[in-house]
Amino acid sequence: MIELSVGQLAAIVEGRVVGDPGTHVTAPAAIDSRQVTRGGLFAALQGEHADGHDHVGGAAERGAAVALVTRELPDVAVPLVVVDDVTVALGRLARHVHDVLAAVGLTTIALTGSAGKTSTKDLLAHVLEPSGATVAPEGSFNNEWGVPLTVLRADRTTRFLVVEMGARGLGHIATLCRIAPPDVAGVLNVGTAHVGEFGGLDLTAQAKGEIVEALRPHGTAVLNLDDDRVRAMASRTEAAVLGFGQAAEADVRLASLALDDTGFPALRLAHAGESVDVVLPQLGLHHGANAAAAVAMAVAAGAPFVEAASRLATATPRSPHRMARHVTDDGVVVVDDAYNANPESMTAAVDWLAQAAGGRGVAVLGAMLELGPESAEMHRRVGQLARESGLRSVVAVGEEAAPIAAGAGDIGVTVADVAEAVEHLRASLRPNDVVLVKASRGGRLERVVDALLGPNRHTAGGPPSP
C-alpha cells in the first residue's frame, strides 16, 4: 500500500471523512477485522450473514488507521470514510494505487481460466520472485474484493503484480480489469466450471476473453493454443500474442510430459531455440500445462526463459487444499484437493490417483456445483472414469454427488455427509492406501481430511510410495 492520508483517501474514493483527515494509512486493506494490520484500512462490507460495520471497533483495537463505511458509527476510535458503496470505493482506491505504481515501473500480469488459475498463479509468483519483488493473491482472491485487496498489498518496491481474475458472467472480468489494467493477460482454458451460470461454453469464452480485450497495444496476450476457444481470442486484441501448450507452433511449448519415478510431473519446456527439463514437485500431470502457462507469462513480463523454467524445480504448493499430501499414523496417504472442483479438474485428479496408486486408490468425491442441467451426467462420467482407471473404491459424499457412485458401479458407494464418509473410511482403509479428497468448495470436504489425520497430522512433500 502506498502511504495516503485519510483526507487523500477520501478524495480518491469520493467519500466523506468523519474524524481526523490527517491520519495516515500505511498498511494494506482488509475485509476481516481479525486480519487488520497496524496502520491499515478496514473495509466494512455488508454481506448476507455478517455486517462489517459491527466489527469496526475490533478493527480499531487491532490498529486500523481508517475504516471504509456506508454510515457514521458512534463511539469508534478510528477515522471513518463514508461512501455510498464500500466495494466500489475499494475498487477506486485500488485503481488509484495501481496507476501510481504503474507510472514507476509496475508490471501487472492478470490471468483467468476455468481451471488451474490458483495453481498457475502460485507457480507464476514463484518463478517471478527472484527477478523482482512480487505481489500475488493469497489463496483464490479473484473477485471484486480479492482483486482490490491484492492490488493494495503492492507498494513502490513492487515490480510484478500477479492478479487472478474469476467470473460467473459477462462483464465481470472487464470490471476487474478496470481495477487492475493488465500489461500481460493470460487465458488458461475454457471449461465447464460455472457453465450453469454462464449459459454455455461459448458464453464462458466470451467472458474469459474480456481479459485480452483490456490489453493496450503494447501488452501481451498469453494464450493456450491447445484450447480452440482460447486460441480464437487472438482476434480480440491488438496486443502481441504469445502462445503456450503442446501445439507445434506454441512459443513456450510443452515438448514432453510424464510422471517420473517419484510420481511428480517431469516436463520439457522449449522456447526460442532453448529447452529446459524439469521435475515439478507437485502432484498431477495437469500441472504441466499450468507450468507452461506460468513460464510463458513470466517471459512476457520480461523474465529470462531458462531461469524462469528452471525455477519450477523448487515450486512447492502455496495455497491450501490443492493436492496437498499428508500421511496418517497408520501409513495412509491423504491428498487434500478439497478447495474446488469442476469436470476438468476432477478428471485430472482421478487420472493422477490412478497413475500414482492404481488399485490402492480411494477417491472421496463431493459435488461439482454450478454445472447446470448436465450436472448429473457430468458427475456420472467422473465415476465411470474412476471405475475404468482401476481405483479400488469411490466414495460419493452427498445426494448431489450420488451420480458419481452410480457411474463407478460396484466400486462406488454414496454416503450422506462428511461424518458418514469418515466412518466408512475408517472401517475400510488399509495401510498404504492413497485417498484423494476433492469437491467444490461448498462441500467443505477438507473436514474429511482433518478427521482422518487427527491432531497429529503429518504433511509430506513427496508422492505416494509405489
Image: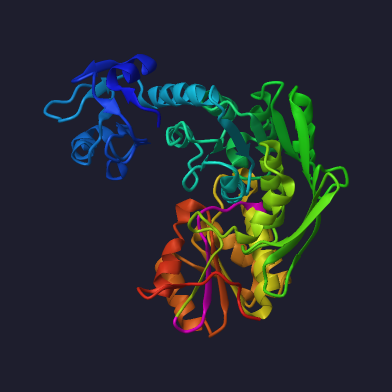
Q: Is residue 354 above or below residue 106?
A: below
Q: Is residue 160 above or below residue 318?
A: above
Q: Where is residue 13 in the image (x, y as percent from the top left)?
A: 37, 18
Name the residue rendered at 34%, 20% in the picture. 9
Question: Residue placed farthest to the left in the image?
Answer: 75
Residue 116 painted magenta: no
Q: Specify start and end residues of the magenta stretch as a single range.
A: 329-344
The quadrant in which residue 223 appears is top right
Residue 339 painted magenta: yes
Q: Quadrant of the N terminus?
A: top left
The quadrant in which residue 252 appears is top right
Name the residue rendered at 73%, 64% in the picture. 266
Q: Which of the pair 131/223 is nearer the observer?
A: 131
Name the residue rendered at 69%, 50% in the picture. 307
Q: Which of the pair 150/466 is nearer the observer?
A: 150
Asked whether the viewer can see residue 352, the reply is yes
Asked whether the viewer can see residue 204, the reply is no
Is 84 placed left or right of 108 in the picture?
A: left
